Amino acid sequence: MNVFSTIDDLRQQRWVDPTSAWGLIPTMGYLHEGHLSLVRQARRENDWVAVSIFVNPIQFNNPDDLTHYPRNLEQDLALLRKEGVDVVWTPAPHEIYPPDYQTYIDVQKISQRLEGAARPGHFRGVTTIVAKLFNVFQPHRAYFGQKDAQQVVVIKQMVKDLNFNLKVIVCPTVREPDGLAMSSRNVRLSPAARQQATCLHRALTTAKSAFEMGRHRAAELHATMLAVVNQADLARVDYISVADPETLSELETIEQRALLSLAVWVDDVRLIDNIIVKK
């Protein structure tokens, strides 16, 4: 496994074999089974598998969140080596954003809802770094998890609008045995908060069951999810959404499919989760 920190060294490796298929998994590190599931799918579908590890400062609207974001590069590299990853890129911030940096990517409309409304500037940071990664690696396929559902929609829109020559592959959310979606932020949960964090998945599955029993009005499903979260005394809702999976517009009644999503503070850790329901 080759580990690089500069753009020049990475590009030199990238074009050693220009005819082979490359798969890229962009990450911010502190890897878990969710990330590794992306690596395994990329390994099955490509000749070369590359992973980027970069805690992107411009997608954090809360400085404390950036400061406390978990990091363990040595552990990450050991996990990736075990999975047979070919290339890992671990750039320093100044490599990505030199002092005279001025260019940002801003996807409109779909980036302004949900996470975009709750975290101003977040998606501008996400799309900017992902566009740079696509430009540096020039992969054939890029892999993302369904847990970050809005991120996937925004990145797909960017790929379409800017004519990136690659395919975005969306992989299922990987969960703990009790249903909690795997996230690097889970390590920050206290034992009590970790126990109550399952309220997100319980809210979603309870709403899904209600939907399958014929309750298709968004307001009813919203109330169902809110009631479940409110049972956890350490949890407070940031947002709950019943939206179109493609446009992220809020629905009144589900006619075909809907993205049920929510963001919840559990103690002082903000978690997100989602599921898609369909008739």
Image (cartoon, rainbow, N blue to C red):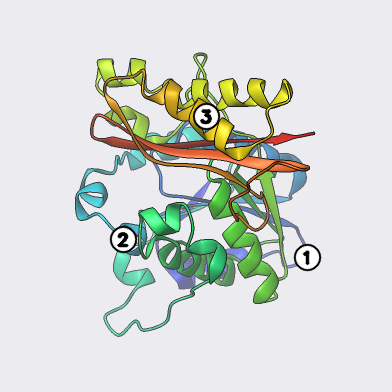
Q: Secondary structure at mark 1?
A: loop
Residue at figure coordinates x 31%, y 57% from the top left: 60
| Relative image position of residue 51 (x, y in whole percent) | 53, 50
Residue mark closest to the camera, 2 vs 3: 2
Q: Amino acid at mark 2?
A: Pro
Q: CA distance from mark 1 to mark 3?
A: 30 Å
Residue mark closest to the camera, 1 vs 3: 3
N-term-proximal mark, 2 vs 3? 3
Q: Are marks 1 and 3 in contact (CB under 8 Å)?
A: no
In front of the other: 41 or 183? 183
| Relative image position of residue 23 (x, y in whole percent) | 66, 53
Residue at figure coordinates x 44%, y 52% from the top left: 115
Image quadrant assignment for residue 11? bottom right
Image quadrant assignment for residue 154? bottom right
Q: Is residue 32 above or below residue 180?
A: below
In the rendered structure, find residue 61 and report the number of the disc placed on it. Answer: none
In the rendered structure, find residue 33 and report the number of the disc placed on it. Answer: 3
N-term-proximal mark, 1 vs 3? 1
| Relative image position of residue 44 (x, y in whole percent) | 74, 39
Q: Amino acid at mark 3?
A: Glu
In the rendered structure, find residue 57 and report the number of the disc placed on it. Answer: 2
Q: CA distance from mark 1 to mark 2?
A: 34 Å
Residue at figure coordinates x 64%, y 26% from the top left: 208
| Relative image position of residue 2 (x, y in whole percent) | 51, 51
Tell me if I can see residue 181 in this picture.
no
- Alpha-carbon neighbours of circle 2 within 10 Å: few (<14), some, or many (≥20)? some
In front of the other: 240 or 274? 240
Q: Amino acid at mark 1?
A: Thr
Q: Secondary structure at mark 3?
A: helix
Q: Secondary structure at mark 2?
A: helix
Give left or right: position of 166 versus 131. Answer: right
Give left or right: position of 99 versus 272. Answer: left
